[in-house]
């Protein structure tokens, strides 16, 4: 048996295991693959809606709580899913073993609710594969040095899957989901979005970090670093989807490859702030110490004094508010804008094509979309706008950059 040629990691997302019928469909897919001589390893998310339900329960008691109990709570949905998959596989005569992260040895740091994988122990996986038993692994979770359960951040099952493929030195990893491919925009928001056959790791990384839910950003980082190509495809359609590959393998790049959005963002505005840089240094280190990650920052001067605005994810809003309450002197007025969203265009082609920013802002101006914050990099432009203008802005940018199908 050649483990490296035959083993293939298959990750199934929440919708793919969202009901008993779907779980049985997934089991059938795995059984067929095994019958064809492959050695599948399965990674699964919780059944759709389950993680949100668990987060909601915790929030009812204390929305600010972060720590091992939070991760134990939200990680529990995956346990149910993998047990059901194993039951369905064994019903089909396929020997399988359910594995939680601590049983397998997925070691992470102790940053609860946003932990990073440090190491994946492959000994048990290799032993199971050698016996032709299908390992069915709980995604999204890990274990820290003190044997606490940790979680990798929302959408983190993708990362479990790619990390396992990397640890086994496999060249690819399959992500089965509820869309047939990665699209040039979220098809739910932009109906004219089209499928992308091949996308570079770099672009996918930007898209994921700018809010495109289709892949967890860490999964793409790990794929890029360890040369694991990621194949995003539909669970219920037997055809190829999108391959995420090194940039060098893509012959032609459009100027803009995708329009990405993130509705889970809030802007915090402070005014007037003390002019000393030390104030910002202290503010951001206090937020960082609490685990709040800051996205876009803008500072300006006006007749009313210095003004600071920055964005954080909606998930971190309660925590950020709490930090502000204790940190800010009474003279500083705080405004929280929560009816906002981030809209971005992404493309490695932007490197060689000047004028993308001009087109981006002209389109937003033409459609009367006011902008709260802006940030750019070599391959992306992002703006925070009012959420009620998101659909208009996304569709207009998609058309402007010739992405409509
Ligand atoms: P899973 O539960 O399988 O992990 P997710 O909900 O995490 O699925 O990710 C799939 C969803 O990502 C799709 O249903 C789609 O609405 C959303 N999405 C956002 N941007 C894109 C995009 N550019 N291409 C495809 N899907 C996208
Ligand atoms: N179940 C987790 C979540 O909903 C992890 C995942 O879906 O990848 O975030
Ligand atoms: Mg997901």
Image: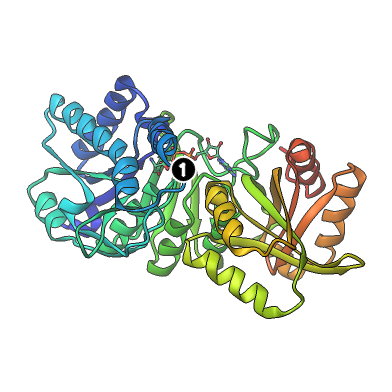
Residue 326 location, quadrant: bottom right
User: Looking at this view, is 239 or 71 the one in front?
Assistant: 71
Q: Is residue 92 visible?
A: yes
Residue 86 in the image: x percent, y percent? 18, 33
Position above or below: 73 against 148: above
Position above or below: 325 against 119: above
User: Looking at this view, is 224 or 188 the one in front?
Assistant: 188
Q: Is residue 13 left or right of residue 247?
A: left
Q: Is residue 44 visible?
A: no
Instruction: Read off the residue under disc 1.
Output: 63
Farthest residue toward the left? 131
Q: Which residue is drawn at the image coordinates 85% and 64% (left, top)?
A: 355
Residue 383 in the image: x percent, y percent? 75, 54
Residue 29 in the image: x percent, y percent? 29, 32
User: Looking at this view, is 1 or 189 the one in front?
Assistant: 189
Q: Which residue is drawn at the image coordinates 40% and 37% (left, top)?
A: 61
């Amino acid at each position: 048996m050649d483990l490296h040629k035959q083993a293939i990691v298959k990750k199934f997302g929440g919708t793919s295991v969202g009901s008993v019928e779907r779980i049985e469909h997934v089991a059938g897919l795995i059984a067929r693959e095994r019958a064809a001589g492959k050695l599948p390893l399965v990674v699964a998310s919780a059944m759709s809606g389950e993680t949100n339900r668990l987060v909601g329960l915790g929030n009812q008691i204390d929305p600010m709580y972060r720590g091992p109990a939070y991760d134990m709570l939200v990680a529990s949905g995956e346990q149910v899913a993998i047990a059901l998959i194993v039951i369905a596989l064994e019903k089909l005569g396929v020997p399988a073993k359910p594995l939680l992260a601590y049983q397998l040895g997925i070691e992470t740091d102790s940053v609860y609710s946003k932990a990073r994988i440090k190491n994946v122990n492959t000994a048990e996986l290799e032993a199971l594969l050698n016996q032709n038993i299908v390992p069915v692994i709980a995604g999204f979770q890990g274990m820290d040095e003190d044997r606490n359960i940790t979680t990798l951040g929302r959408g983190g099952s993708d990362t479990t899957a790619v990390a396992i493929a990397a640890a086994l030195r496999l060249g690819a990893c399959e992500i089965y989901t509820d869309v047939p491919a990665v699209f040039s925009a979220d098809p739910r928001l932009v109906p004219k979005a089209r499928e992308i056959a091949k996308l570079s790791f770099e672009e996918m990384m930007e898209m994921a970090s700018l809010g495109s839910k289709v892949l967890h950003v860490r999964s793409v980082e790990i794929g890029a670093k360890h040369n694991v190509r990621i194949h995003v495809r539909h669970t219920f359609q037997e055809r190829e989807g999108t391959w995420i590959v090194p940039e060098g393998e893509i012959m032609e790049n459009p100027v803009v490859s995708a329009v990405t959005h993130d509705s889970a963002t809030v802007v915090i505005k402070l005014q007037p702030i003390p002019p000393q840089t030390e104030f910002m240094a202290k503010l951001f280190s206090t937020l960082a110490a609490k685990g709040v990650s800051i996205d876009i920052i803008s500072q300006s001067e006006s007749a009313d004094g210095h003004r600071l605005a920055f964005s954080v994810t909606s998930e971190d809003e309660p925590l950020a508010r709490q930090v502000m309450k204790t940190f800010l002197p009474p003279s500083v007025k705080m405004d929280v804008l929560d009816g906002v969203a981030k809209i971005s265009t992404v493309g490695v082609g932007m490197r060689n094509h000047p004028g993308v920013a001009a087109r981006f802002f002209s389109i937003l101006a033409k459609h009367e979309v006011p902008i709260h914050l802006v940030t750019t990099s070599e391959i992306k432009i992002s703006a925070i706008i009012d959420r009620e203008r998101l659909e208009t802005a996304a569709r207009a940018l998609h058309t402007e950059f010739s992405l409509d199908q």
